[in-house]
Structures are given as C-alpha cells and as structure tokens.
Amino acid sequence: MLCNIEESNMTKNNRSPAGWDAVANWYHGWVGEKGSDHHRKLAIPAILDLLQLKQNEALLDIGCGSGVLAAYTHEHQVVYTGIDVSERLVKIARQQHTGTFIVGDARRLKQQASIAPQSFDACAFLLSIQDMNPLEDALHSAAYALKPGGRIAILMTHPCFRIPHLSGWGYDEGRKLQFRRIDRYLTPQRVPMKAYDGNRSGNTVSFHRPLSAYINALGSNGFAVDALREITTYKQPRDKATRRAEQEIPLFLGLHARKVNE
C-alpha cells in the first residue's frame, strides 16, 4: 500500500528506489492478503466510503503495494489497476489478486504506455501519498490519468496530529488527561523510518507536510476538494483518559476531490 519515491533515489537508468523492495516480504507478512487490522477496520472502509465506486468504473490505485485494495473492489465490479514503484510488491500483488498491476513511478504516469490520459474514473491513494515526493508531481500525474469530472480519494495519517518522530501521546498526571504532543508542524520534513525486516536491510522514507500543502497542491492541479474526513482509531481502550483522547484526536485524514479543470 506504500510507494516510497524520492528524486534523489532515482538513478539515471530509472531504477526504482530500493527501500520498499528491501522490506517487501516484511510488509506482506504484516499486511497479508486482506490487510492488517488497521486496513480492514479503518483504512479500507474509509477509502471505499470516499470513492463511492460504481459498476464498471475504472480505478487507479496509486502506490498499491501488495494490492490489498484490489481484494475489496471486485464486489463493486470495477476495473482495477494498481501501480507501485516496488517490483517485489507488485509481484506479490499479481500472485494474490486479480486486476492489472504495473511497476512504475507515480510521478510519471505519462511515461506508462498502459496508462492512457483521461482513462480512469477514480484514483486512490491508500496510505501511500505521504511516501511520495514531490507531492505536486504525484497529483499532476493523477490529474493526467483521470477523466474530466473524475475523482480522487486520499487516505493518510493525519498530518496535523501524526508526524513521524515529531508527535506522540503524553499524560498529564495532575489533570488525569491524555494529550497529543506536536513538536513541529509547519515545516516540511523528510523523515527516515526504521529498518523493518529481521536483517535491518531496508529503510523507507516518509514526507511530512502541513495540511495546507495537500489542499493547495490539489487546487493547483485542477482538483476541487468536496469532502474531508477526520478519522479516529477503531480501538476501544478501557481507561477513560485514553478512550477520550482517541475519540477526540483523529490520527487519520480522508480527502475527496473532483477534477474540475482540463
């Protein structure tokens, strides 16, 4: 479900970044065929609610990873295409799901012969857009692929409250209050993530941006945002302080926009 792209990682012969290839087996082991608990109980329902797919529509899943979303689109009888920069994740997707899966750069969909301009009714970024940089290029590519009036659905960790290495939970003993601590927000951050597999051979990168960066980038690429969802966890903690905090502080954000400009 992730597509880690950074300009400095792309070599002159267009080799894809090694980050997600190196952790592909770990990622697949965590996600599985139908997704992790967070996918099944939160992310998948949220993005399907945003997409409102209709029969025979063409959907492009950008940063498809191992193809988890594909498993949930067939009941809607849509024509599914997934694209991801990781050859290993795409191989896994092809082995376990039906649909079309392409190895490619989300920022350069015009270079994909199998992706025609204005050929998709909807595009989805399911927990992938924060692993893509530059943001403008990824959204410009999505606009290229969408039909006039086509729509885009984005589900991501909330950029206001969930910033890798720069946010976390705190507890005020005097007030018996759990709170969310934000160390930095407005400054964009390139955040190296931990090595995931047992051999610690793979590292990925996440890109933090303020919410305004997403809204402005959508607007500059011809999209009009018509829905925003702030989503809390599906978990139900027993203690009152944690339960109240997790009910009030969203850690995921959903955006829906329509292509209004050619």
Image: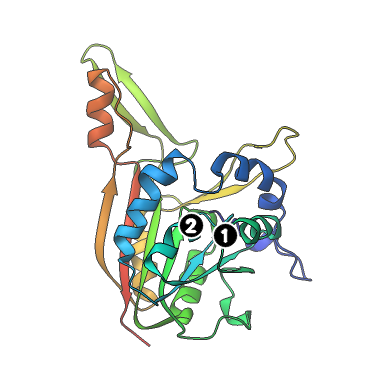
Report the quarter where the C terminus lies.
Answer: bottom left
Check whether the beta carbons of the residues at disc 2 and disc 1 lie within 8 A of each other: yes
Placement of 220 over or under 251, stated as above or below = below
Residue type at the position of mark 2: Ala
Residue for point 26% across, 29% down: 245
Q: Is residue 113 left or right of residue 76?
A: right
Residue 58, image x and y in percent?
Answer: 44, 76
Query: Which mark, by number, is residue 71?
Result: 2
Residue 260, image x and y in percent?
Answer: 30, 82
Placement of 9 over or under 248, stated as above or below = below
Residue for point 50% across, 86% down: 117
Placement of 139 over or under 96, stated as above or below = below
Residue type at the position of mark 1: His
- Badge 2 element: helix
- In primary-sequence order, the first of circles 2 and 1 is 2
Residue for point 63% across, 80% down: 111
Residue 254, visible in the rendered structure: yes
Q: Quarter-wise, where is residue 112 in the image?
A: bottom right
Residue bearing mark 1: 97
- Badge 1 element: loop
Residue 157, visible in the rendered structure: no
Residue 89, image x and y in percent?
Answer: 65, 55
Please tell me which residue lies in front, 135 or 61.
61
Q: Is residue 232 left or right of residue 167?
A: left
Please tell me which residue lies in front, 106 or 40.
40
